[in-house]
Amino acid sequence: MYSPSIRNADSSPVGPVKETLAIGMDIGGTNCDIGFVNQHGACLRHISVSTQSHACFEGFRDATLAAIREHLQQLAGYRCVGMGIAAPGANSRNGRVTDPSNLGWPDICLTDAFGRFLPFPIYVTNDANAAALGEKKYGFAKDLNNFVLLTLGTGLGAGIFVDGKLLLGRSGFGGELGHTRISDETRLCGCGQMGCLETYVSATGLRRTVMELIAKYGKSSGALSHLDFHQLTAERVGQAAADGDILALEAFEITGSVLGKKMADWATVLDPEAFILFGGLTRAGEFLLDPIQRSFQQALSNFLRDPIPVVLSAVPHGEAAVLGACHISEFLHQTQEV
C-alpha cells in the first residue's frame, strides 16, 4: 500500500517528499477503531467512533468521515496513500458487507460508500482476516505459515493462514468459524441459524450463558444476579470472576470448554502451528484461556503429536485489526497472483 514519494512522468521528485501513512479502520459491533499508521508500522493516532449511537449507516459514515478529515488535517506533514476497512461479514472480493447481523445495517458496499468522499484507494476485508494479517505482520505469527486467529468480540470470527496465504474461499467467506454449529436446538444466532458457535463463544454468548446460570441458580447466584441482560457486560463477568464469583467462573468454564472442543475439530482439518486469540473477551485472561486449553488438549486427536500452542495476540490490544487493515492491498495483490 505504501509509496515513498510522488513522482512525475520522468521519475523526478515533485516537491518535498512527505512520509506516507495509511488508515486502518476496524468496525466492531460496539465501536469502530481507526488508526493512522505510518510506513514503518507505527500508529500515529488511534481514535474510536461509536457504531451503536447512529440510527443508520449513513449517520455512522458521516461521523467517521468527519473524524478522519479532522485528524488528517492535524497530520498534514504526511501523505495518506489509502485506507483499509475491516468489518464483520465484509468480502475482499467485492468490497461489500453482506448481512452485517451485529451492526444492524443493510448490505453495504464499503468501497463505494467511503470511496466517493475520500481521495485515496479504499480496500475492504473481514475483520478477522485483518486481525490475522496484523498478527502475521507484527505479532506472534510473524514466522508462521499455518495458523488460526480467532476474534472473540461481539461475535466470533476467524482469520486462517494456510501455507502462508490467507484463506478466502470461493466467494470470499472462507473462515466463518463462528457460524459452525454446535447445536440445532438452542440459541438463535443473528445469522438466522440455531446453535452457531458464536452464540456461546463471544461476549454476547458469555452474557447469554450467565443469564441461563442466573435462571438455574436463582437469587443465590452472587454478584451478577441483580443485573438484566443489557446491564451485563463481559467486563463485569470478568471482574466478578476475578473476585471469585462462582457463577462467573462457571460461565467462563462453559465458554472455554465449548471453544476448546471446536478448536480440536479444526486442528484435525487444518493442522495449524498455533491458535491465536484476539479481541475484547480475551481480557478475561486465565479465566478463559485455562478452560480452553484443557478442553482443547483433551479433545485433540492422538495423531497430532506435536504441541499446538494456544496463545493470546502479541499485538497491542485493539491494534491487530487496525494494523492489518493497513496492509489489505498487499494481501489482495498476493491472492490475485495465486
Image (tube, rainbow, N blue to C red):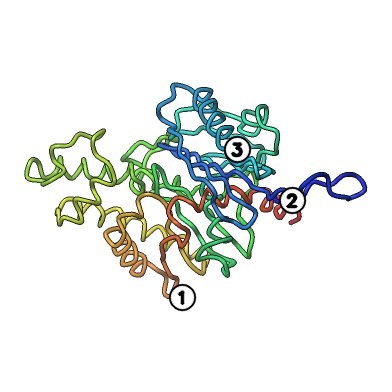
Rendering coords of residue 93 (x, y %): 67, 42
Q: Is 47 placed above or below 238 here?
A: above
Rendering coords of residue 211 (x, y %): 21, 40
User: In the drawing, does residue 309 fall left or right of residue 94?
Assistant: left
> Badge 3 is on which residue?
72
Q: Which mark is residue 3?
A: 2
User: In the drawing, does residue 286 fall left or right of residue 190?
Assistant: left
**Amino acid tagged 3:** Leu
The residue drawn where x is 7% and y is 40% is 219
Q: Earlier in the sequence, mark 2 or mark 1?
A: 2
How many circles with numbers are drawn on the protein?
3
Rendering coords of residue 128 (x, y %): 51, 49
The residue drawn where x is 52% and y is 52% is 131
**Within 10 angstroms of label 3, few (less than 14), some, or many (20 or more) residues?**
some
**Amino acid tagged 2:** Ser
**Within 10 angstroms of label 1, few (less than 14), some, or many (20 or more) residues?**
few
Q: Earlier in the sequence, mark 2 or mark 3?
A: 2
The residue drawn where x is 50% and y is 23% is 59
Between 113 and 156, the one nearer to me in the picture: 113
Q: Is 316 placed above or below 69 here?
A: below
User: What is the distance, in whole Å, between disc 2 and disc 3 at their CAs?
Assistant: 17 Å
User: What is the distance, in whole Å, between disc 1 and disc 3 at their CAs?
Assistant: 53 Å
Residue located farthest toward the front when viewing the structure as drawn: 16
Between 146 and 141, the one nearer to me in the picture: 141
Q: Which mark is residue 130?
A: none
User: What is the distance, in whole Å, between disc 2 and disc 1 at their CAs?
Assistant: 47 Å
Q: Earlier in the sequence, mark 1 or mark 3?
A: 3
Q: Which mark is residue 303?
A: 1
